Image: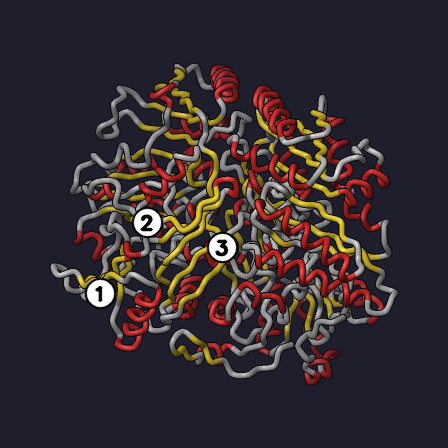
Amino acid sequence: MTLRMPAPDLAVIDRRDEIAVALARIVSPGSVIADAERLRVYESDGLTAYRQPPMLVVLPETVEQVSQILAYCHAEGIKVVPRGAGTSLSGGALPLADAVLVSMAKFNRVLSVDFTDRLAVVQPGVTNLAVTQAVEAENFYYAPDPSSQIACTIGGNVAENSGGVHCLKYGLTTNNVLAVEVVLMDGQLARFGDGTLDSAGLDLLGIIVGSEGLLGVVTEVTVRILPRPETARALLIGFPTVVDAGQCVADVIAAGIIPAGMEMMDRLAIRAAEAFVQVGYPLDVDALLIVELDGPEVECLLLSSQIERIALANGAMNCRISQDEDERLTFWKGRKAAFPAVGRLAPDYYCMDGTIPRGRLPEVLDRMAQLSREYGLEVANVFHAGDGNLHPLILYDGNRPGELDRAEAFGSDILRLCVEVGGVLTGEHGVGVEKRDLMPTMFSEIDLAHQQRLKCAFDPQLLLNPGKVFPQLRRCAELGRVHVHNGQTRFPDLPRF
Amino acid sequence: MMDTLEREPNVLRPESGDDLREVIGKAAATGTRLRLRGGGSKDGVGASAADASIIDMRGFSGIVDYAPSELVLTAGAGTPLSHIMSALASEGQALAFDPFDHGPLFGKPAGTATLGGIVAANVSGPRRLSRGAARDHVLGFSAVSGRGERFIAGGKVVKNVTGYDLPKLIAGSWGRLAALTEVTLKVLPSPRTSAILRVHGLAPPAAVAVMARAMGSSAEVCAARHIPAHFPGTPHGAAVTELLLEGFPESVDARLASLSALLRDEGEGAAVECLCGEAGRGWDALDLLASTPEGASVWRISVRPSKAAQVVVRLEQGGASWTMDCAGGLIWAVVADHSQNIREISESAGGNAMLMRGPQSLRQSVAAMRVLSPAVAALEQRVRRAFDPAGVFETGRF
């Protein structure tokens, strides 16, 4: 582990038994976990390179209990880390040695569904897929579909502003949430959004979504549900180079078409996926594009033939259009298995998540190949091509000394490269602990101070999920005293952690 | 250097980020209050203190970067909306949301609204229903906060979760956190064609049911409204309910057919008419409102569609005129009797009402936006102080 977390407060750790007793008074019997073996279950999330058992785990089952837990921790100065299913790929739910981990797993009920208002009210521990399952009998669904949708929870989706493969057309979580109920760090209950299209006041709902568990603990979520498109159809297109595939994507958009999804895989990812699931991906191509269209049958037919023409004009070596639902799902099977498939090529892989302006893709891939040679580590690329969101998968062996560090350094270089070409550090996985120290590549100290003051407005003692998102530990009072002279800030020299 | 307009001595017109930083920094130091203004199309909303100095933001004008294939546009906040829309139209694109110019509601000519004003007020027209509001498509911005500091947030690509989503917070903040200098927005291809399915003679509950049925179908309805027979200036003799479809011609035709069939089966026998070509182009957010009597106040009520019918019954009981948009999720109320408690009617149905236009006396006594719960109001106050500790942007407008 190369990343430093804030030094644990030993005085709090010394009080562990007393804190466990206090928490047990709030929740039902058996809902506080204090023994080392069971705490280990929670020691990491989807970013498995980082592990730290929490001081204690508490599993509330009512909003009142969440409120009491936070009020108690607030009064006692105890840090809190909220957790959904623990599928974060950026370490958003990484525990701290001196913090109480609040698991929202027991908040697992769909509270109501309304087809006139086209919304569902769910508890935060409901899985992403379960929302769709609750409404699919009426032919509705919940649009954001992160790859972990079987396991990940809506509360976690809200915290991370999760995406998926259909973002370009249907938006991220933030575009599909109408209201949230949140317990603030001091135990107060607040509602943001009223389930109507436009609520009054500042858009604090928009801030809660994507705040990575730093502003409050979400206890209820109202999501928009959509009617299922009439049909869906996919194209599987192989190109001799990624440049051709990238141009095809640009030309599809220039033709006025916004497909439901456009996914690209590079040679290594194609080969790994085909070896894993044998779905008939072409192996003689350098780039594979899956383009999905949804909507009326006639529209899908029309646009699929248009896209086929565009693809052939861009040098496509082969192009298949799904003829039925089975074939469409087969096209997707390899892409959806790409991560585990690449995972078979090496003992470990490290998944990155930058976004770039799509036009810079060839250049970014070239430089990534060069970095791959320099670091001596292979990289496979899967790419949400429609919105420029790259997922390079760096292959390494964690058992070889220094290789994890090298993989992380390589990953950081890739993300710096994304920012350098006009992109961003993370398209959908969040900053968490993983990209925390890279934030200054995108934002100046003044930019970050504006974000951190927002944190202070919600949680002035910085007790909620500390050590995530922001690279510097700076107390709120100190942020208030930052002076500006001729556009330059003078920040006190505080330690980086 | 900044212009100080002669006829309006307390209007400042900064031309650069440094100018703006200086103005705001000075105001913070001297306790001056500043009111940010683009084209002034929404000047009539709320009631600002008369002593506030106005900052005219139109010096920050022009398209900075527009890459059609990236679906991203960056422009100065003072750029006229009309300029942005024509630049996009020349590439067959449009903003990803449905903006409109409030000017005509206040008797002003259209065309003065600026991009920054549109974002700051989170404006979005009838397609709000399917495309989202301005807030859904603001990708990034640069601004000067009430601290007199320049800062950026968000990014210039369509998918980004790096840091807090300040673009959401800025959208709809009505100039109370920071002065926007540059905005990056998502853009999308313009639909090739559109058509309207018009249903005649529905009562409000049936209209809401038809709109809900249409929105819940796979016909991809883009906008949906209902105009009752008595709405002032309506050209229709009877109530009409309109469903807008947009997209590729073959697709629109197919959806029009399936939706007509659906409504024939379930539309309570109402007459259904298809409008294509020019007549099927959709409607403007203000087409019915701009011509309402000047003395009448105009309220914008957001409510869940399932509550819309009960709200309009109460509006009618008080003598107000109304029309529904966004499938009933938005009700525009035109109110001549200012003693009618529109806010209570909206909030008792779980919604919220904004006083969009009203005589000065009403705006002085009634807040433009609903009052928030104490916990949220206190939090909002802390958030505003985080960006604007001296209250530079607190003109009392809301």
Mark before the other along the chain sequence, 1 or 2: 1
Name the residue located 37 percent from the left edge and 65 percent from the top edge. Answer: B144
Q: Give me the chain letter of mark 3.
A: A
- Position of residue A454 measured from the top left corner of the image (x, y, whole percent): 48, 67
The local secondary structure at tag 2 comes to loop
Identify the residue under disc 2: B79
- Compared to residue B284, the image places residue B49 above or below, namely below
Specify few, some or many for label 2: CA neighbours under 10 Å numbering under 14, 14-19, or 20 or more. many
Is residue B276 rendered to the left or right of residue A426? left
The local secondary structure at tag 1 comes to loop
Name the residue located 62 percent from the left edge and 40 percent from the top edge. Answer: A246
- Compared to residue A359, the image places residue B22 above or below, namely below
- Position of residue A109 measured from the top left corner of the image (x, y, whole percent): 65, 48
Is residue A318 rendered to the left or right of residue B193? right
Residue A205 badge: 3
Is circle 3 on the same chain as circle 1? no
Q: CA distance from mark 1 to mark 2?
A: 23 Å
Specify few, some or many for label 3: CA neighbours under 10 Å numbering under 14, 14-19, or 20 or more. many
Give the colour scheme of this rendering: secondary structure
Between B257 and B13, the one lying in front of the other is B13
Q: Are marks 1 and 2 in contact (CB under 8 Å)?
A: no
Residue type for callout 1: Ala
Please identify the quarter of the rendering in which residue B103 is found: top left
Is circle 1 on the same chain as circle 2? yes
Q: CA distance from mark 3 to mark 1?
A: 30 Å
Identify the residue under disc 1: B52
- Position of residue A22 measured from the top left corner of the image (x, y, whole percent): 68, 75
- Position of residue A446 measured from the top left corner of the image (x, y, whole percent): 47, 70
